[in-house]
Image (spheres, rainbow, N blue to C red):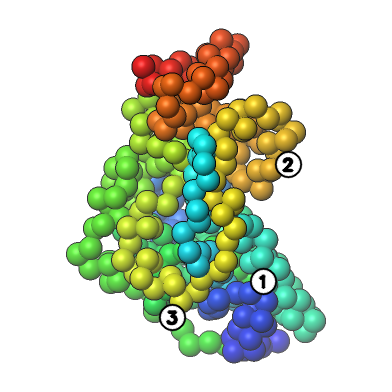
Amino acid sequence: MTATLTALSEIARANGIDRVGVTDASVLERTRGDLEERRDAGLHGGMAFTYRNPQRSTDPQRAVPGARSIVVGARSYAADRAPRRPEGFVASVARYSWADHYAELRLGLEAVADSLRSDGERALVFADDNAIVDREVAARAGLGWYGKNANLLLHGAGSFFVLGCVITTARVDAPAAAEAPFAAGCGSCRRCIDACPTGAIVADGVVDANRCLAWLLQRGGNLPVEYRVAVGDRIYGCDDCQTACPPTVRLGRRHERAVPDAAAWVDALELLASTDAELLERHGRWYIADRDPRWLRRNALVVLGNTASRDDQAVLATLRHYAASTDAVLADCARWSLDQLG
């Protein structure tokens, strides 16, 4: 069966997807080489995801045998305003996690997949999945280019988007999208590189995950001492390289969504007083290494050291409690924060 991108785009947009494209289901050779090269250089920082098996994550045929096409969808998470910061010692959340945009994206892509299945084709949805490198198929589909921060910048819209795709055995007709080097859209601009608080962008389009706060706050283990001050008030993720990007800031407004104030902040003291079950109920859709809430507590302890008042007795009591913990990581972070507060 041959489908048309025009028809599938109408279905996608009717179901909350902002941008749609299509590419063929051939091997993602460029990204396969990048993943292997950066993994061998240790730039993955222990991240598994698509690094675990580049032969698999760059071959659409592994996901859907007989695949001919990949329909790519992008859903904006640009907020219609800056959320109001609550009172108290609050930690910030990266904007892509203010709402479950991936859930909405998957619903829209499922509608596209259902249309293809109704014509007798196989069609599977992938979003934030280690089976396929979303950014590369989106780039091949002509949705945008790689920025110097390694994010995909959509033409005329910037990078505040979650990406996903439908891999299908159907042949989807669309004009072929020429691959363009990421520098084509960025020119001499290097604001994302200069804005990174840890210097994690080590070359144009290359991020050292060992320094990237977005990854350091997700992975297990202790937070490197040399990056704890740079964590600032972050509990989950980092937006700095995107909020410094002129196209993203200026053009992202074309696809804005409403967001509640509370979604952007977490009360650090409340988090540290919560049980594992309570934390997983509130934040279980976040990526937390091994689904272990201790890493959220680790982050919150460092946030207090960076942002709290040395005169606040509730903060000091919480830090002293954790400093006496039998958990070596949490005790270390609490002692560090007590030292920071003098």
| Lower sequence index among marks 3 and 2 | 3
Please tell me how crowded label 3 is: few (under 14), some (14-19), or many (20+) other residues with Cα within 10 Å.
Answer: some
Q: Position of residue 7 (x, y in %)?
A: 64, 89
The residue singled out by tag 2 in the image is 281
> For numbered disc 1, what is the local secondary structure?
helix
Q: Which mark is residue 109?
A: 1
Label 1 – label 3 distance at C-alpha: 21 Å
> For numbered disc 2, what is the local secondary structure?
helix
Instruction: Residue 61: tell me if it is visible.
Output: no
- Farthest residue in the left direction? 188
The residue singled out by tag 3 in the image is 177
| Lower sequence index among marks 1 and 2 | 1
Closer to the camera in the image, 327 or 184: 327
Label 1 – label 2 distance at C-alpha: 26 Å
Tell me the residue at 30%/71% (across/down): 185
| Lower sequence index among marks 1 and 3 | 1
Q: Mark 1 belongs to which amino acid?
A: Leu
Q: Position of residue 323 (x, y in %)?
A: 52, 13
Instruction: Residue 129: tell me if it is visible.
Output: yes
Q: Is residue 103 left or right of residue 34?
A: right
Q: Is residue 271 above or below residue 81?
A: above
